[in-house]
Image (tube, helix red, strand yellow):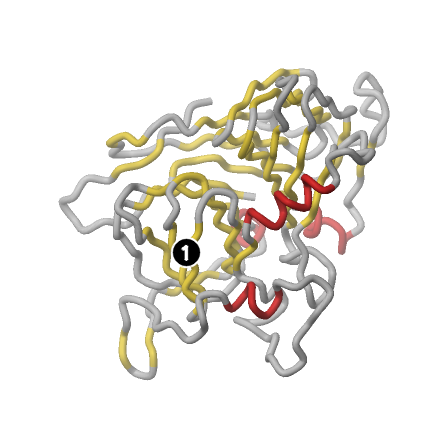
Amino acid sequence: MYTAYRLNDPHEVMHPHKHTASAIRFGLTGSQNFTGVEGEDITFGPGDMVLTPRDTWHNHGNLGDKPAVNLSVLDLPLVAQLSALTFDHDYKEGNERKQQQSARFPTDYSARVYGAGGLLPRFVDHFRGVGGSSPVYVYRYDPVREALEKFRDWDANPYEGLAIEYIDPLTGGPVFKTMTFFMQMLRPGERTLPLRQTASLLVAPLEGSGHGIVDGQDFGWERHDTLAVPGGAWMEHVNASATDPAILFIASDEPAQKPSACCNASAASRAASRSGWPEPRSMARAQRTRLVSHIDCPGGGQVWVDGTTLFVEHMRRPAGTRTRCARATG
Ligand SMILES: [Fe+2]
């Protein structure tokens, strides 16, 4: 997986483009992040997840008066490894080249059609984009947060806490064939048991503070940090607060591994041997990236973490203007 912080200046909207990598945008700051997806104009804020499935036209931006930051997660390294990565910036409606997509759906289309769990309108064409991905283009934070709260007093999975997965309502499976996403609650003082899996994870805390212990190394985190967990590493989550819950947004490449039956998980002691597990590649190590501030940054930075890349993403700006970006620190 690949992840990046994206900063949009006030009232800045990119031209439409599409690519064969599938992506999500997860709102961090600002209440009017904007992504138009195949004619559905979506305005979103902290905790909302927007899908741009492979080969769907989309344009990013910010409709608000203040800068807005969101987190991108893509299956780009996998698609590139398969020599299947293409981009297209030549957006047209009819024969006319357009700088922004025309709205063809109500702004609440995803919620109106798919917002009632267990109910599916039969008079709607559920084939969106090029098919194969969830037709829900925005998953709002409030419903998943309310769902977590309902289960707050239940017995959680000892390895994952309370985790709720985002699903494709047409299949009941993950939203993409390559990546899946969870919202996870750690109750006050909760610590999960060590879990090792072949899937790589991207952990993005949205509420609270705590620690991620990856192969015995302790990474403290706060909201808006990201933690990359390489496949094959032992992972433990700790909520450091005795009074407040912690909410983690988690991306996993588990669906990409399942068709080839190479997906595996182990919940034995972290001290167990690596027998039967591949040794991590020499580059593999956990990495925390912190959203520090908005700064003027001419070049940006990049750190590689096994199959996961954390780096700063720049908006394409007119020549001669400065590029502002978020700074990543290890
Ligand atoms: Fe894109």
Give x and y (percent) for residue 244: 61, 24
What residue lies at 68% left-to-right and 51% top-to-bottom? 256
Give x and y (percent) for residue 200: 65, 38
Q: Which residue is mark 1?
A: 43
> Which image quarter: residue 170?
bottom right
* In-image side of 51 versus 261 (left or right): left
Give x and y (percent) for residue 262: 78, 46
Q: Quadrant of the N terminus?
A: top right
What residue lies at 39% left-to-right and 46% top-to-bottom? 31
Ligand 1 in which quarter: bottom left
Q: Please tell me whether residue 248 is drawn above or below residue 8 in the rendered image.
A: above
> Which image quarter: residue 122?
bottom right
* In-image side of 45 versus 230 (left or right): left
Q: Please tell me whether residue 248 is drawn above or below residue 2 in the rendered image.
A: above
Q: Is mark 1 within 8 Å of ligand 1?
A: no
What residue lies at 56% left-to-right and 26% top-to-bottom? 208
